[in-house]
């Protein structure tokens, strides 16, 4: 039957099937399911949201690329929520002036839409210096976790060392995986291997995203307890955590710390519910 197939196809057919594709692993398998809506998929740290096409396009600033700062500030102050989101992002690219800093700071701390607040503090980071840092510190108490996560990014970009105490408090007290992850990354840039205790604790977090990043940064800790924990994590039920631990075990800790930039090659991997706009703050 396979005589006429190219060699590479025959080789592929002889390969072991991917265990992740095993039908036995499908949600609802071996359950009494009468309809698709009865199937429940459990996933940690996930909130499934809904977004309109207009909202999903809010990150596209092309419609306002020819507008000046005054026009964008007008949209930021008086537009609908989609216009305000787009204006906040576009204001990151205009020349720095007091009106821009004030407008973005006002939106970051006062807009009712959490995405506007998130985009505004992101844009403000490139303009505001100390004002941006002050706004970011205030936003560490924002009710929306993605705003808080972006605030940590702002502090990291403006002056992470000056705000080390804020980052420590955030890591210790915030309960959202994205916020804790960003704080841990920023602190690792400051402290390096001295973060061992915190990373070992995070490696036991319920969130696989936190375990993944803890495993990644433990690659920069040249201690037996770090290697022992990484060896344990190679059996983590989350494949991405296990694979990250394997890579960290093979890393040279000193080289790892010198080259650490706070980004993994699979950082584009989205959890369900994290696919709208810039829901993954990048450090």
Image (cartoon, rainbow, N blue to C red):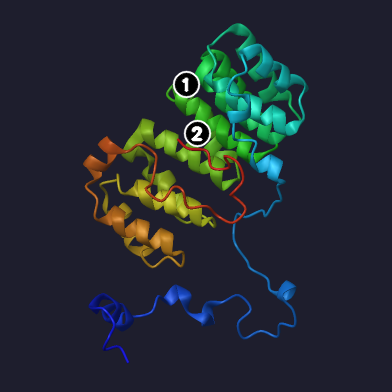
Mark sitting on residue 158: 1
Name the spot of residue 197 as percent of width and height, x first.
Answer: 40, 45
Q: Secondary structure at mark 1?
A: helix
Q: Residue at x 50, y 26 (%)?
A: 155
Mark 1 closeness class: few <14, some 14–19, many ≥20 residues within 10 Å? many
Residue 52's disc is: none
Residue 114 lies, with reference to residue 216, above or below; the image says above
Q: How many marks?
A: 2
- Secondary structure category for the residue under label 2: helix
List the single residue furthest toward the bottom: 1
Residue 177 in the figure: left or right of residue 83: left
**Image position of 101 (left or right of 200):** right
The image quadrant that residue 103 belongs to is top right
Of mark 2 and mark 1, the one earlier in the sequence is: 1
| Tag in front: 2 or 1 | 1
Residue that mark 2 sits on: 168
Q: Residue at left 53%, top 20%?
A: 93
Compared with 168, 180 (above or below) is below
Q: Quadrant of the N terminus?
A: bottom left
Residue 64 can be seen, yes or no? yes
Q: Between 6 and 30, which is closer to the camera in this rendering? A: 6
Q: Residues within 10 Å of mark 2 (few under 14, many from 20)?
A: some
Position of the C terminus, as image quadrant, is: top left
**Residue 198 position in % (x across, y down):** 44, 44
């Amino acid at each position: 039957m396979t005589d006429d197939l190219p060699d590479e196809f025959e080789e592929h057919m002889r390969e072991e099937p991917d265990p992740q594709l095993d039908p036995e692993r499908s949600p609802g398998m071996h359950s009494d399911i009468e309809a698709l809506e009865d199937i429940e998929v459990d996933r940690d740290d996930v909130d499934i949201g809904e977004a309109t096409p207009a909202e999903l396009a809010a990150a596209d600033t092309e419609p306002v690329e020819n507008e000046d700062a005054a026009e964008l500030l007008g949209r930021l102050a008086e537009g609908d929520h989609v216009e305000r989101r787009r204006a906040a992002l576009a204001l990151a690219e205009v020349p720095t002036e007091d009106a821009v800093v004030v407008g973005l700071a006002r939106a970051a701390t006062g807009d009712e839409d959490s995405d506007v607040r998130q985009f505004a503090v992101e844009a403000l980071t490139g303009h505001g210096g100390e004002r941006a840092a002050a706004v970011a510190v205030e936003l560490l108490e924002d009710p929306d976790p993605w705003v808080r996560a972006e605030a940590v990014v702002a502090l990291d970009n403006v002056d992470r060392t000056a705000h080390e105490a804020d980052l420590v408090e955030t890591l210790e007290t915030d309960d959202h995986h994205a916020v804790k992850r960003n704080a841990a990354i920023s602190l690792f840039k400051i402290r390096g291997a001295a973060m061992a205790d915190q990373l070992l604790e995070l490696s036991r977090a319920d969130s696989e995203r936190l375990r993944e990043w803890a495993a990644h940064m433990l690659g920069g800790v040249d201690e037996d307890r770090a290697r022992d924990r990484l060896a344990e994590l190679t059996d983590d039920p989350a494949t991405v955590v296990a694979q990250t631990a394997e890579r960290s075990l093979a890393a040279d800790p000193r080289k790892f710390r010198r080259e650490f930039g706070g980004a993994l090659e699979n950082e584009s991997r989205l959890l369900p519910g994290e696919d709208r706009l810039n829901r993954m703050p990048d450090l």
